[in-house]
């Protein structure tokens, strides 16, 4: 999925574990409950992407620093 345009995509509960998302555009995407553990998010645009407490991120990845927004 390198360079993929997933802007505003509804990825609720999607399993993207281990996905290679180099430079992908996930701005505005709904990542509630998604599994992105072990995904390569280098250069991925996550501005205004929404996630919740159930969203799984790669170890040591800070989604808020990347521009994603936590929702309740």
Image (cartoon, grey):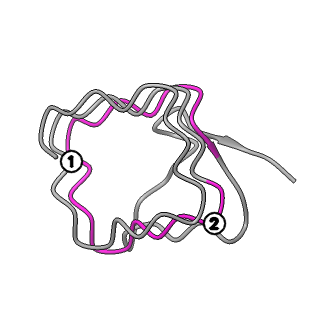
Q: Residues within 10 Å of mark 2 (few under 14, many from 20)?
A: some
What residue did someone put label 1 on?
21
* Residue 70: x %, y % from top left: 73, 47
Query: Where is 41 relative to 19, above or below?
Result: above
Which badge, 1 or 2, comes first in the chain's sequence? 1
Q: Residue shown at 28%/27% (left/top)? A: 5
Element carrying mark 1 = loop
- Residue 69's quadrant in the figure? top right
Helix, strand or loop: magenta stretch: loop
Crowding around mark 1 (Cα neighbors within 10 Å: few <14, some 14 to 19, many 20+) is many
Tell me the distance, in whole angstroms, between the alpha carbons under discs 1 and 2: 18 Å
Residue 33 position within the rendered picture, expressed as x and y whole percent measured from the top left: 63, 66
Q: How many marks?
A: 2
Mark 2 lies on a secondary structure that is: loop
In which quarter of the view is residue 30 placed?
top right
Image spot of residue 22 (x, y percent): 15, 43
Q: Does the segment drawn in magenta span residue 39?
A: yes
Query: Mark 2 — residue?
Result: 33
Q: Which residues are magenta?
A: 32-50
Check the picture and name the quadrant holding the C terminus: bottom right
């Amino acid at each position: 999925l390198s360079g993929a345009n997933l802007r505003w995509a509804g990825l609720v509960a999607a399993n993207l574990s281990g996905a290679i998302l180099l430079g992908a555009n996930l701005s505005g995407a709904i990542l509630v409950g998604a599994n992105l553990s072990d995904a390569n998010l280098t250069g991925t645009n996550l501005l205004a992407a929404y996630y919740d407490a159930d969203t799984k991120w790669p170890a040591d990845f800070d989604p808020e620093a990347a521009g994603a927004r936590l929702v309740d």
